[in-house]
Image: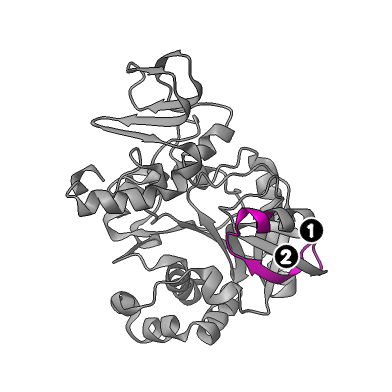
Amino acid sequence: MVKDMAQFIPVILAGGKGERFWPLSRFDQPKQFLCLDGSGKSLLQSTVARLPDWAGEVWVVTRLGLVPLVQAHCPHLPPERILGEPEPRDTAVAVAWVTQQLLQQYGDEVIVGIFPADHWIPDAVQFQQTLAQAVAVATQNQGIVTLGITPTHPATGYGYIQQGAAVSGGAYRVVRFTEKPDLAQAVQLLAAGDYSWNSGMFFFPAGLMWRELAQYAPAITAPLAQQGVAAYAHLPKISIDYAVMEHTQRALVLPVTFAWDDLGDWRSLERLAKNPLPAQQVDWGSSGVTVYSTDPQELVATLGLDNVLIIRDGKVTLVAAPERTQEIKKLLTQLREQGYGDYL
C-alpha cells in the first residue's frame, strides 16, 4: 500500500441487467460479463484488473443468481467477499448493505470505493493516480467524493454535478445534482463550464456513509441493522444519488480528465476505437448503418438504409434507430408481455 494512504477497500457493483445491450446482454449473462471493448476480458474482469496494487481486498455486490458467474470470472475472490442480493433494490441498498459489512470488518475510517462494473477506462495508470487523490480527498475532508467526468458534448444520458467552493486536494463542494437533463438543458449546463458528468464512482469513509444513509434513508438502514439481508424484500428501490447525494452536505466532486465511457447502450460502442463484434457486411446505397454480430462468419447485407443499427445474436436480431437505443427497455417490456421472455 502507498505510504500514508488510508486503508482502501474497492467495491464493484455487478448486479445490473444491462438491458440496453440486448440482445447480446441477457438476464442470465448481462453485459458486465461480456467483452465489449475488444480487450479479451469481460467488463467485470477489466474493472478488477485496473485497480491499483495498493488497494485492499476487492468486494463485489451482485444479484444472487449471478454469484456463480462472478466466481467464474474472478476465481481469486473468496466467496465471503461476493455479496449476492436476493433481489435488486438499486444502488442505495447495495451500498448500504456492503457498507454495513465493511464497517463490521474494517471499522469506521476505512475508505470505501464504489465502482460500476461496466465502465471503459483505457488509461489504468492515470486512473490509479486519480484513485489515490480521491482517497486522500475523502480522508482529509471527511466527505463523500464522486469523480466528475469532464463533459465533451451535451449528453442527455448522464447526470450532471455542479461544482462550488474548492476544498483541499483539488476537489469542490457539490452545489447540485441534475439527473439526465433534456437536450436544451444539457446545452446550458455544458456552456456554464462548472458542471461534470456523474461517473457513478464514489469514495467515502464507511462510518460517514452509514450515518448519512441513516439520516436520509432510514427506511434502508434501520431494517438492515435489525434483520440484515433478510430485510431485503421490504427495502425501498432507490439509487444512491437520490437517497443520499442529493441531500447530504458532505458531497464533493473531484473533476478528472482520464478517458471514460459508461458503455450504457449500443451507441457507446461507436465511440470505441475497435469494433468488438465485427460481422461480414455487404451494402449497396446505405449510409449510417452499423452492424454487430456474435458470429464473425455471419453475412449481413443491407440495401438503401439510412441511420440504422443492426445487432445479431443467435436467433435474435435487433434493428433499431441508433438515437433510440435508450428505449430498448420499453421494447423488452413489450416482448415479455407478448410471451417472448425466453429471448430475454
Disc 2 secondary structure class: strand
Q: Quadrant of the N terminus?
A: bottom right
- In the image, taking residue 87 as reference, residue 1 lies left or right, namely right
Disc 1 secondary structure class: helix
The quadrant where residue 186 appears: bottom right
Residue at the image point whose x is 61% and y is 69% from the top: 204
The range drawn in magenta is 168-186
Q: Where is residue 7 in the image (x, y as percent from the top left)?
A: 61, 65
Q: Where is residue 329 in the image (x, y as percent from the top left)?
A: 37, 52
Q: Per the image, is 174 magenta?
A: yes
Tell me the kind of residue under disc 1: Ala
Task: Say whether disc 1 or disc 2 marks the residue closer to the N-terminus.
Answer: 2
The quadrant where residue 308 appears: top left
- In the image, taking residue 335 as reference, residue 96 lies left or right, namely right
Dots 1, 2 in contact, CB < 8 A: yes
Q: Name the residue under label 1.
A: 192
Q: Where is residue 17 in the image (x, y as percent from the top left)?
A: 36, 52
Residue at the image point whose x is 43% and y is 67% from the top: 94
Question: For mark 2, does the 10 Å Cα neighbourhood hold few (<14), some (14 to 19), or many (20 or more) residues?
Answer: many
Tell me the kind of residue under disc 2: Gln
The quadrant where residue 202 appears: bottom right
Residue at the image point whose x is 43% and y is 26% from the top: 291
